Image (cartoon, rainbow, N blue to C red):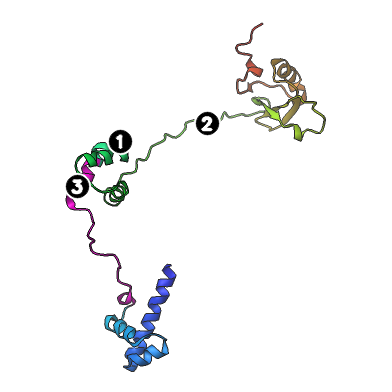
Amino acid sequence: MHSIITEELRFRKRVCEYAIKHGNNAEAARRYHTSRQQVQRWVKRFDGTIDSLRLYSRKPHSHPNQHTEEELALIKRMHSKFKHEGLSQVYVELKKRGYKRSYGSMCRQIRRHIKEKKVIKSVPKSKWKPDLVTYPGEKAQIDIKYVPRESLDFSTQGKSYYQLTAIDEFSRKKILKIIDEKSVTNTSRFLLNLEAKMGFPIHTIQTDNGREFTNYGATD
């Protein structure tokens, strides 16, 4: 839209310059395919700058049903007092005090005349920093995830399967194992053979504290 308006202004400027150069509005109108009266109006406004040919605002200066100053003051007062209860409550309080406009009209006046300050919540930056590992086996992460049946290349016969994953943080070496049950038994067996498969001793193991790792709440 901005480029269209700019091209229109440039066109008007060319028309005015041609009409002034030749001293003939009718000739300029014929050349640029517009009316002589239009050229005359543009030339009368033209002061050498393109801004003088801009469109005038079509916004009316007033209208018979516009809000009065008293109504606007009442809206601002009720909005300040009851805005925490919602705009519906603001409208109810206005009606109690003689306000006769519609709900939509009230909302338009609030958007136009009442500028709400945006509350920007300050979120403190996290102070968390990853543990620094300096050698293989210092810390390994172990997690367990459900494996969709369609991604397996063997018949599941209706059973659910899970993948145990162990990753050494220093070397990023990864060990995987498919199990058919989330249980302490399976994770224990996985841990017993983990160091041998990694090829080095493991000092610390990090998990998500699931029951298959900690067995919290289990009964004998």
Please tell me whether mark 3 sits on a helix, a strand or a loop. Answer: helix
How packed is label 1: few (under 14 Cα within 10 Å), some, or many (20 or more)?
Answer: few
Residue drawn 37% across and 40% down?
A: 120
Q: Secondary structure at mark 2?
A: loop
Residue 199 appears in the rendering: no
Q: CA distance from mark 3 to mark 2?
A: 54 Å
Q: Which mark is residue 84?
A: 1
Q: Nearer the viewer, residue 30 or 54?
A: 30
Q: Which residues are magenta?
A: 50-78
Q: Residues within 10 Å of mark 3 (few under 14, many from 20)?
A: few
Q: CA distance from mark 1 to mark 3?
A: 18 Å
Residue type beneath disc 2: Lys
Point out residue 126 in the picture as x, y percentages from the top left corner: 47, 32
Looking at the picture, which amino acid does disc 3 mark? Ala
178 or 206: nearer the viewer: 178
Residue displayed at 40% across by 72% down: 5
Pointer 3 residue: 73
Secondary structure beneath label 1: helix
